[in-house]
Image: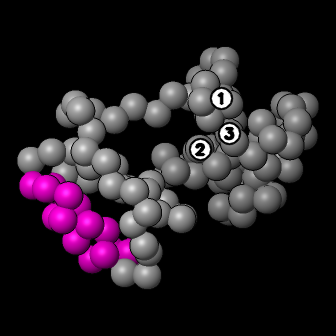
């Protein structure tokens, strides 16, 4: 099996499949309304997301604080962003990136 990256207009899906057609099938089974706009076979067995590319730099405490803000806001992303900005003094763009990246990790 190979590792595939499937890009849609709303998601980037990472999955194992025998071939490209199998990867597309997995996408359509899980996201039937999504259209695959790009399917790429990854050259290695791992996929890495750079925190710097997401605009997240510094110590790990930022993630802890972001998760705390998400918890206090009951998962309301906009409220969590406001809380994060208030507690850190960072700008809207950095707060958005930090909160959204922690939503993906699951809080």
* Residue 3 appears left or right of 98: left
Q: Is 22 a magenta residue?
A: yes
| 89 relative position to 7: left or right | right
How many callouts does the rendering have? Answer: 3
**Magenta residues?**
17-31
Give how far across and how far down residue 8 sits, in percent.
46, 63
Q: Dot 1, how many residues are within 10 Å of its Cα: few (below 14), some (14-19), or many (20+)?
A: some
Task: Farthest residue to the bottom: give it.
Answer: 33
Residue at coordinates 44% horizontally, 75% vertically from top-left? 34
Looking at this rendering, what residue extends furthest in the top direction?
58
- Residue ID for mark 3: 98
SS state under label 1: loop
Give yes or no for contact between labels 2 and 3 (Cβ–Cβ under 8 Å).
Answer: yes
**Which circle marks residue 101 in the picture?**
2
Q: Secondary structure at mark 2?
A: helix
Earlier along the polypeptide chain: callout 1 or callout 2?
1
Question: What's the coloring here?
Answer: one colour
Instruction: Determine whether the residue tagged by mark 3 lies in a helix, strand or loop.
Output: helix
The residue pinned by badge 1 equals 56
Residue 58 included in the magenta stretch of the image: no
How many other residues sit within 10 Å of disc 2, few (<14), some (14-19) or many (≥20)?
Answer: some
Q: Does residue 73 appear in this view?
A: no
* Tags 1 and 2 touching, CB below 8 Å: yes
Residue 70 x, y percent position in the rendering = 67, 52
Q: Earlier in the sequence, mark 1 or mark 3?
A: 1
Most foreground residue, 41 or 54: 41
Q: Is residue 4 left or right of residue 85?
A: left
- Picture quarter containing residue 12? bottom left
């Amino acid at each position: 099996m190979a590792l595939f990256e499937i890009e849609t207009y709303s998601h980037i899906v990472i999955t194992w499949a025998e071939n490209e057609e199998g990867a597309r099938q997995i996408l359509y089974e899980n996201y039937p309304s999504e259209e695959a706009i790009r399917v790429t076979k990854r050259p290695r067995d791992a996929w890495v997301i750079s925190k710097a590319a997401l605009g997240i730099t510094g110590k790990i405490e930022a993630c802890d604080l972001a998760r705390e803000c998400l918890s206090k806001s009951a998962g309301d992303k906009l409220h969590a962003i406001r809380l994060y900005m208030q507690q850190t003094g960072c700008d809207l763009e950095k707060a958005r990136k930090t909160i959204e990246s922690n939503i993906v990790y699951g809080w």
